[in-house]
Amino acid sequence: MKRFSSLLASTLVLLVLVVSAGAAAPQPSALFEAKSVTDRDSALATLEAAAPSDPASAYAAGAGEFFTALETLASGLHRHGFESPQSFMLPLMRLPVPENPNPAPLTYEEFRAILVTFRDRLQKSAATLGSVPAEADIGMVIDLTRLGIDLNGDGAIAPDESAAAIMAALSRGGSPDSVASSLTFRFDRADGYWLQGYAEFLMAQADFWLAHDFKNTFDGSFHMLFPRAKLPLQDTLVPLDGGMGRSIFSSEWRLADFISLVHLINWPVVEPERRQAARRHLLEMIRLSREDWTAIRAETDNDHEWLPGPQQKGANPLTGLDVGEEQVQAWFAALTMAEDLLEGRILLPHFRIADKGINMKRFFDEPKPFDLVLSITGPAIAPYLESGKILTGEEFDQIQRQFGGAGFLTFAVWFN
C-alpha cells in the first residue's frame, strides 16, 4: 500500500509537470490567425506570460507587439480621419488607413501622443525580440493573408486588413485585390533580427519627429492629412468636396499644402535626447541587419524563406527576387557605409561645398533647429561641416550596381 501511494504521488507530480510544460509553450497560431482584436490580445497576453521561459513564445510575442504597435498608429490616425498622401516622402504616413466618415477633432498634442504610444510599443517589441537567444531553434509557419491588424478600430481583423493586403496597398500600384491567395513563409531566428531591426528603424523616425516642436507645420499643413479633423485652417483651405484624389500629385490643394509643409519644416529642438536616440536606433538597426545576414548565410535548409540567402535558390514569392552573393556583399558594404556616416568616420557630401562634408554623428548628437529647406540649400548644415574623408558618388554607385535591375532601394526595403 505504501509503495502504491508513492507511485500515485509520483504519477501526479509527473502529470503536473506535463501540464505545466504544455502551458508554458502556447501555440502562436491563435495570435497570427485571430479574427478579432479580443482574441488576438488574449493570445498575445498568453505568449507574453510564457516568454521569459520559452524562446518561441518570446519570438511570437515580440512579433505580435510589433504588429499591435502598427495597429495603434493606424487606429489613432483613423480615429481622426487620416487620408494617406501615398507618398514615399512621408514614410510614417503611408499606412492604408480606411476612410472614416465621422472623424474626431485632432490637436497637435494628441498627434504627438499617438507617436509616443507607437514608439513606446515598438520599443517593447524590440526588447522582447532581443530576449530570444541567438541559438534558439525557431520555425513558425505564417500565412500573411491570415495575419492582420485592425486598421479601422472596429474590433475585427478582416481579410482586407491582412499583412498581405497592407503590403499590396503600400507597393507601387498595388491594391488589396492583387494579393496572392496564399503567402506562406517559415519565419526562423534570422527573421527575428529582421523584424527587430525594423522596429529600431521606425523608432528612429518617431524619435526624430518627437525631438522637435513641429506645431507650426501641424497647424499650417496637416489638414492635408486630416481634412475633416477641425485643424486650424480646415475651413479656409480644405475644399468642401474634399478635392480630387488622395495622392499629393493628383490634387492641387494637397500639392499646395505639401509645399507649405516643406516650407514650415523649421523645427526647434524640444527633446534633444530623442534626436540622439534616433542615431542609436539606426546604429542598432545596422547591427541587427548584420546579425540577420550572418544567421541567414549559416542556414542549410530552404523552407519558405522570408529572406533567402545565396545558398537558398529560388525567387521569393512576395518580391519575385532571387538573392545572390553579390547582393549580400553589396549590402554589407552599404551597412558599413551607413555606420561610418552615423559614427562620423566619413562625411556626407553637400552639392555646394567641395572641400568639407557633413558630420552626421554631430547632426544627431548636437541638435540644432531642423530647417529642411536651409539644410538643402546649405545654411542649416554649416555648423556640422568638417574636413575629412567625404563619401563620393562613385562609392555609392558601385554598391548600387551590384543590385542590378531591381535597384538598391527595392532590395534595401526588403533586406532592412
Image (cartoon, grey):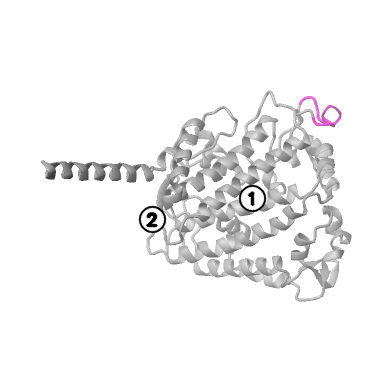
The residue sitting at the front extreme is 2
Three-letter residue code for mark 2: Asp
Please state, as top left, top right, bottom left or bottom right, where the C terminus lies in the image.
bottom right
Q: Residues within 10 Å of mark 2 (few under 14, many from 20)?
A: some
The spot of residue 232 in percent (x, y) is 84, 31
Pick the front one: 185 or 129: 129
Q: Residue at x 74, y 47 (%)?
A: 210
Q: Is residue 398 above or below residue 18?
A: below
> What is the magenta range?
231-241
| Residue 248 in the figure: left or right of residue 331 | right
Q: Residue at x 79, y 28 (%)?
A: 230
Three-letter residue code for mark 1: Leu
The residue sitting at the left extreme is 1
Residue at image mark 1: 202
| Secondary structure predominantly adopted by residues drawn in magenta | loop
Which element carries disc 1, helix, strand or loop?
Answer: helix
Q: Residue at x 25, y 44 (%)?
A: 13
Residue at image mark 2: 303
Please state, as top left, top right, bottom left or bottom right, where the N terminus lies in the image.
top left
| Residue 337 quadrant | bottom right
The residue sitting at the top extreme is 102
Q: Is residue 392 above or below residue 50?
A: below
Pick the front one: 16 or 273: 16
Q: CA distance from mark 1 to mark 2?
A: 29 Å
| Residue 333 in the figure: left or right of residue 187 | right
The residue sitting at the right extreme is 379
Can the viewer see residue 307 in this picture?
no
Q: Nearer the viewer, mark 1 or mark 2?
A: 1
Which element carries disc 2, helix, strand or loop?
Answer: loop
**Does label 1 or label 2 sit earlier along the sequence?**
1
| Residue 130 in the figure: left or right of residue 256 | left
The spot of residue 114 in percent (x, y) is 68, 38
